[in-house]
Image: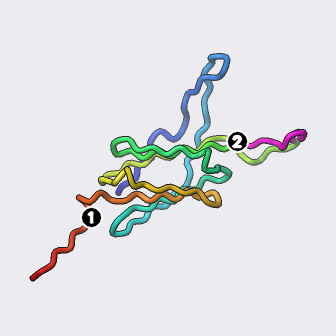
């Protein structure tokens, strides 16, 4: 599996008034590991809960978007803001066939864990000798 960064900088989004503004994307850090049966992708998405994660696979492109909104508690007004607002976006090219129906995803402690099972045709075969 090779990885490539694609479209991770800015995206135009319309506002309620109809004007377009630049949307800031952050590229999260990630690790990819491989076993005999699957690939594992771990992506850091600090402050993003599972409702804020959108994962899609189209052809050989895995797209991960994490949305994080920083808000002051009700009745409070912010005095200083250092926690960044913004969205995370990561696009990875999958140069191998995967079983899309069996992909598993879990978010825990700001880490997204994806298990991408390999398609049967690329798994190593062991042949018995008789």
In terms of image quadrants, where is residue 36? bottom left
Q: Which mark is residue 69?
A: 2
Magenta stretch: dominant secondary structure: loop
User: Which residue occupies the foreground of this view, 18 or 49?
Assistant: 49
User: Along the horizontal axis of the image, is 21 left or right of 120?
Assistant: right
Instruction: Look at mark 1 in the image and give the residue it sits on.
Output: 123
Percent x, y of residue 113: 52, 59
Q: Secondary structure at mark 2?
A: loop
Query: Is any part of residue 22 visible from this angle?
Result: yes
Choose between 23 and 45: the one closer to the eye: 45
**Extreme residue in the top direction:** 18
- Residue 12: mark in rendering: none
Magenta includes 73?
yes
Label 1: element kind: loop
Q: Residue at position x 40%, y 61% from top? A: 39
Closer to us: mark 2 or mark 1?
1
Residue situated in front as seen by the camera: 80 or 116: 116
Q: Which residues are magenta?
A: 70-78
x and y percentages locating residue 110 in the rendered image: 63, 57
The quarter of the image holding the C terminus is bottom left
Q: Please say whether residue 89 is visible from this viewpoint.
A: no
- Badge 2 local density, few (<14 within 10 Å), some, or many (20+)? few
Q: Which residue sits at x=42%, y=47%?
A: 62
Q: Is residue 58 above or below residue 48?
A: above
Density class for disc 1 (Cα within 10 Å; few <14, some 14-19, many ≥20) is some
Total marks placed: 2
Image point 74% across, 43% down: which residue? 70
- x, y (%) of residue 118? 33, 59
Q: Earlier in the sequence, mark 2 or mark 1?
A: 2
Q: Let me know if residue 17 is in the magenta part.
A: no
Q: Is residue 70 left or right of residue 40?
A: right
Left or right of 35 in this view: 110? right
């Amino acid at each position: 599996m090779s990885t490539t960064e694609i479209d991770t900088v800015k995206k135009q989004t319309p506002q309620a008034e109809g004007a377009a503004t630049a949307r800031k994307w952050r590229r999260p850090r990630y690790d990819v590991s491989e076993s005999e049966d699957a690939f594992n992708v771990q992506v850091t998405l600090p402050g993003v809960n599972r409702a804020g994660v959108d994962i899609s696979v189209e052809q050989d492109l895995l797209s991960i978007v994490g949305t994080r909104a920083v808000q002051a508690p009700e009745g409070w007004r912010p005095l200083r803001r250092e926690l960044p607002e913004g969205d995370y976006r990561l696009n990875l090219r999958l140069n191998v066939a995967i079983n899309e129906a069996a992909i598993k995803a879990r978010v825990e402690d700001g880490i997204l864990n994806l298990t991408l099972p390999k398609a049967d045709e690329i798994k190593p075969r062991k042949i018995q000798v008789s």
